Amino acid sequence: MEADEDGFLYPRIDMDRCAACGRCESVCPMAHVPGPAEPLEEPELIAAKVKDESLLMKSASGGAFTEIVRSVMRKGDCYVWGAAYDEDLKVRHICSHNDEQLSRIRGSKYVQSDTGGYTFG
């Protein structure tokens, strides 16, 4: 992966190591943009909003994300993966299994995330 002038990572082929098999081109999301999805026969809307005002003010999804994750966590020993800022303000994926870690992955991050080097919270 190589950063462009804005710092976003894109795949780059090392031509010295390329075997010209074409496998990378067949799966590359940059080369194969999916077409429009089939329209739904009957459009459906589902909306949710938590009643807890303090949680609502911390959330970008009306609090739905936090409540859905909490309900899953209550069912047993499980983990939720999400994007969180690290100490260098880079967005990385972390594993969350408690409310403290959950607060780190709550909210929108409008930057490219680093999906490598996962950490467990």
Image (cartoon, helix red, strand yellow):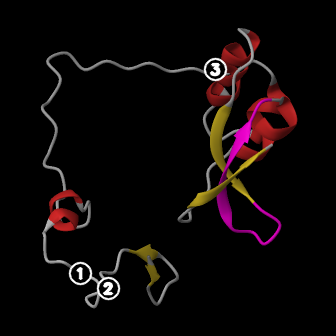
Question: Whole-percent x and y of residue 23?
Answer: 18, 63
Q: Secondary structure at mark 1?
A: loop
Per the rendered image, the range of residues in magenta is 86-97
Asked if marks 1 and 3 touch (Cβ < 8 Å), the reply is: no
Q: Quadrant of the N terminus?
A: bottom left
Helix, strand or loop at disc 2? Answer: loop
Pointer 1 local density, CA inside 10 Å: few below 14, some 14–19, many at least 20: few
Tell me the amino acid under the disc marked 2. Answer: Asp
Residue 68, percent across and down?
A: 63, 20
- Counting from the top left corner in percent of width and height, residue 93 is at 64, 51
Looking at the rendering, which quadrant does residue 26 occupy?
A: bottom left
Q: Secondary structure at mark 3?
A: helix
> Which label number is shown at residue 18?
1
- Residue 89 located within the stretch drawn in magenta: yes
* Within-10-Å neighbours for mark 3: few <14, some 14–19, many 20+: few
Q: Is residue 14 above or below residue 36?
A: below
Task: Report the front residue among 32 and 65.
Answer: 32
Identify the mark at residue 14; answer none if there is no mark: 2
N-terminal-most mark, 2 or 3: 2
- The residue indicated by pointer 3 is 68
Q: Are marks 1 and 2 in contact (CB under 8 Å)?
A: yes
**Residue reaching furthest top?**
75
The amino acid type of the residue labelled 1 equals: Cys
Q: Amino acid at mark 3?
A: Ile
Give the Cα separation between the discs numbered 1 and 3. Answer: 45 Å
Please state if 36 lies on the left or on the right of 111 as rendered. Answer: left
Q: Is residue 29 above or below residue 7?
A: above
